[in-house]
Amino acid sequence: MAKIAILGYGTVGSGVYEVIKTNQAIVNANAGEDIDIKYVLDLRDFPGDPVEKILVHDYDVILNDDEVSVVVEVMGGVEPAYTFVKNALLKGKSVCTSNKALVAAKGPELIRIAKEKNINFFFEASVGGGIPIIRPMKECLTADDILEVSGILNGTTNYMLTKMADEGWEFDKALKTAQDLGYAERDPSADIEGYDACRKIAILTSLYSGKNTDFEKIYTEGITGITATDIKYASAMKMVIKLVAISMKEKDDKGNEGIVSMVCPVMLDRVHPLYGVNDVINAVFVKGNVLGPVMFYGSGAGKLPTASAVVSDVVEAVKTCKNEYIGWDAEELKLMSVGSVRRSFFVRMKGSEKDKLAEAESIFGPVTVVKAPGVDGEFGFVTGEMSEDDFNGKYEKLDGAITRIRVNQR
Amino acid sequence: MAKIAILGYGTVGSGVYEVIKTNQAIVNANAGEDIDIKYVLDLRDFPGDPVEKILVHDYDVILNDDEVSVVVEVMGGVEPAYTFVKNALLKGKSVCTSNKALVAAKGPELIRIAKEKNINFFFEASVGGGIPIIRPMKECLTADDILEVSGILNGTTNYMLTKMADEGWEFDKALKTAQDLGYAERDPSADIEGYDACRKIAILTSLYSGKNTDFEKIYTEGITGITATDIKYASAMKMVIKLVAISMKEKDDKGNEGIVSMVCPVMLDRVHPLYGVNDVINAVFVKGNVLGPVMFYGSGAGKLPTASAVVSDVVEAVKTCKNEYIGWDAEELKLMSVGSVRRSFFVRMKGSEKDKLAEAESIFGPVTVVKAPGVDGEFGFVTGEMSEDDFNGKYEKLDGAITRIRVNQR
């Protein structure tokens, strides 16, 4: 029998408890031995709750119990989670976590300790909630040179953008509704500013590059600038606007290869695999040099889907007698500048096409004009393909520019 | 260094050779040791080809070479593949195969021998080509009671149905084009009659149920009955027709639980996750009791994607020192009758709505009439939800019935 401890009895922690109890026989069979929750750690008391009898407030009880072989960390945040996890690993206990902040900040060190101790540090639930993506990347896509990992990694903003497109809602109404439904926190900045998606794409980039990706160096632009009018233009072009987290191998102007990563709203056309990913669904798109594109799609958040991914890590940790090495070194990945990424750009401009198109084309060269029904006093256009740097230089010169949104993925 | 042999130098076999040579450094790093192709077995000669020097015509050379630790079987068909694979396993060599006919027919026995010999029999490429689905099901979706595995598992028919919908082609033109493009064989029956999808859903059903699924007992209906007119009706309803392979846990009228599996054309509406899966793309949809729905999407066939999946199995076979047990017993799964599956049905009927609707409603109860632009002398309708058995009894009584197609997935 494998004894485990759950650190944190919040949304995900109570979900982990529920998933194990609900599917106990299946979980035991898959793990090859019975899994028993010996402790739940939380500062709070839960009188009358089933965990009441196994609840502890002092982490040392868990740390010093040699019977506990797997620790589930679902507290969130870097501290005290980091200290707790590190000490568990040093004591020879495998750790499974859903904590993307912890993994993005401290991944390589915790992976190294797990390797040294010949145990495991697993974090499937830290990206894409219930969608299996980390284990498939490390254990299934092993014959390929991974050229791109991109995706819709934040359910809250995807819900908001879906509602803005389908219902014509303004940003504020979409945010308020997302908050009312419990998708967005009262301080929604981690979602709407793109910080959450940024940490997740940093983790995925570290995994496929093998080097540590500093999430603070990823160009990140959220959806706070996206308006109902922008979406009218997108609809007129039969496109959708999605918050896409992108990581891909690119060549710069001098032919140097590198990885470029960014999080930003992108207009996607109907043939793009992420086009139909709506509501709180997440999807991760991976492109291999021989495999071509594959996509993983599912519930990117939510108590039970996230808990399902955590418990599948617990099953793997119990089943596996040795370290499954995850190639993610402490050496920092030098990200390539986003300035060299080439694509088209959608621009909104004050004035009429008649008066201002010539000026726009004198700066950008030939553009495709876009008209959105019911939008007056301005017009939109899509540029030809150019680099970010090139575009930014030109956009600065444009008199009457309202906004710009990247088109497609590259 | 791990020495491997490839049995069969056809499309997939030459792809496996190409993938290993192209991505040799990546493959070696992921496997943890160098992978060297020592032999290629084929009856033919390939003068001037890079494999010329390692080509053998006699399987015993491979079988009796103790240096060969992994055998890749990509010949297709049950014999002689079965004999070759069985003998390799008995000699203690792991086997990786893309051969769905072999896996569907002989899976449990080969899995048992691999377990007894503490080696591995892997078959990721046998379902969904390059899409990782078998390993994710066995190693990632381990916290869930799997309630449903359904998908678009045949690229040829999906290409044909996509073209019929997008271009208005008749069945014969779609088939001819698929053959010209090399998607369909000269004898296309395995694709268009649904036999290929049937073997694949049998494999997936065996994997999640743990018992052996006899593919001959799966209700299978291909796309040969689908016409351009059917698709006009589907378009009028903003639906698409897809060849869907379905396997799900159901309860019959008496409350008995079981698994029902079928392959048939189904009309899907726009919110269905398989709605947007077009061309030769395959997708597998899995529903867990706590995870909810996840979907795996990618190239379901093709030389390099399939070879990528085979090589990922080779990497896993080399990396793994012991048997990774796949719970698929020889005991036969007793499939539940499809007769109890409840859903709506689309029906085409000769005559006019004015003359014949009352008759239809006297048999089926209230129906929703569907009109397709440019289709005269007949009309269509969608029934309420009822069981297959119930529907079939009623449909037999309908005078002037042209065809019927199942609607949605349940």
Image (spheres, coloured by chain):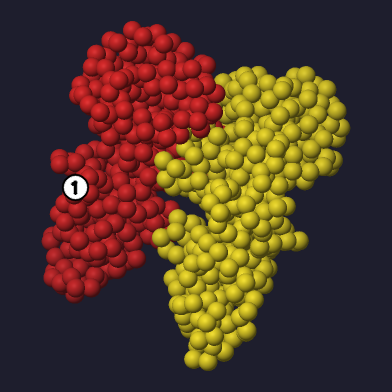
Chain colours: A yellow, B red
Q: Which residue sits furthest bottom?
A: A355
A120, A247: nearer the viewer: A247
Q: Position of residue B90 (x, y in %)?
A: 36, 10
Left or right of A336 in this view: B197: left
- Dot 1: element: helix
Residue B51 occupies quadrant? top left
Residue sitting at x 64%, y 76%: A396
Q: Does B194 appear above or below B49? A: below
Is residue A140 in view?
no
B22, A125: nearer the viewer: B22
A118, A218: nearer the viewer: A218
Is residue B308 in view?
yes
Given the image, on which type of amino acid does mark 1 rest? Gln
Q: Residues within 10 Å of mark 1 (few under 14, many from 20)?
A: some
Residue sitting at x 38%, y 60%: B269
Q: Position of residue B119 (x, y in %)?
A: 45, 15
Q: Which residue is mark 1?
A: B179
* Picture quarter with the N terminus of chain A: top right
